[in-house]
Image (spheres, grey):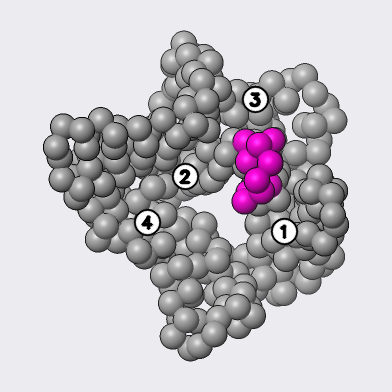
Amino acid sequence: MTTTHKERMLSVDVLKGLLIFSVVLGHCTVGREEFAYSLTADICYSFHMFLFIGLSGWLVGKKEKNREWIIRRGKRLMIPYFVWSCFFCIIKADSIVAFLYKLFFDPYLWYLIVLFLCDLIVCILEKCFRSRNRFIVSGLGCFLILNILYITNIISNIETFKMLAIYFIFYFIGYCLHKYEYAVNKRLSLICTILYPFSMILYQYKIHERPSVILSSIGLSDGIIQFLNKTGFVLYNHFVVAALGCFFFTRAAKVICKRTIYLRNTFSFLAKYTLQIYIISDLVKINFFRNTLVNVISSLVLGLLVPCAIGYFIHKNRTIEKVLFG
């Protein structure tokens, strides 16, 4: 392994750790009325899962796609998905119908099933289209079809497919960047990094909702206004802000790698237990203190440390680890 490759994989580990930290922080602050917490949640949700799934695509970009690979991938992702989803559904579902609906169409652990669907789509496309150009065009075609179905409300009530429509393009871009060894233009990266904070100002104040006033004043029907509003919302929040956030925090991870040893080691450690943290962190979230800040900090610390401890001890038994965490 070359020094350059080692440095790149260290950057990947730091980025994974930073992302899972952002996931837990976002879960701890979302839904709180205070401005500081709502802003923190907005920042976390603007980029973390988009970059996570893009990184997941990048990590499998060089792997040979065949039947054995997709079976291994399915076992690694879907066994923990079904085990933990059944656990969550049994606790929260009121009936068998609700249980089955939550299991397949409105999953608690949506990231795992969406990631596997992305793997499956890319594997099928690779088998059907050997040419690089045809493969890329077919992937973009899938993205467009999924988003047309989402924007026109055909699949918007099915959370699994809604999430697939939103996140597939980030997985696909990450996959292609690694598979075809595309280099990101440094000037473009810097411009996007600078633009991200400004995009969050618009995101925070929901500028994308304003066209409805303009459109209604020129006599367009409610159906058309709703369609245009949703299209603008999807394009701005889910793609423009998310893409800029991906550039910003990828650069942040590189800076952390080079300049901050403590944070680098902390995030690298968290990267070993990303799945454990993703699954378990919400189970240890607390809200029984009167002080909101104490609740947030306690939930953040427990949400990171408890899953890491569980992952560390379960690692000694590979059978249990495979069933629970792939």
Read off the residue under disc 4.
Answer: 162
Read off the residue under disc 2.
Answer: 57
Read off the residue under disc 3.
Answer: 252
Residue 312 in the image: state x and y as whole percent. 82, 60
Secondary element type, mark 3 = helix
Give amino acid for label 3: Ala
Instruction: Please tell me which residue is depicted at 49% across the width and 31% down the height of the picture.
Output: 205
Disc on the earlier residue, 3 or 1 = 3
Read off the residue under disc 1.
Answer: 281
Q: In the image, is residue 148 above or below residue 12?
A: below
Q: Are marks 4 and 3 in contact (CB under 8 Å)?
A: no
- Give the residue furthest to the top: 187
Mark 3–mark 1 Cα distance, whole angstroms, equals 24 Å
Residue 113 in the image: state x and y as whole percent. 47, 63
| The residue stretch that appears in magenta | 29-39
Disc on the earlier residue, 4 or 3 = 4
Q: Are marks 3 and 2 in contact (CB under 8 Å)?
A: no
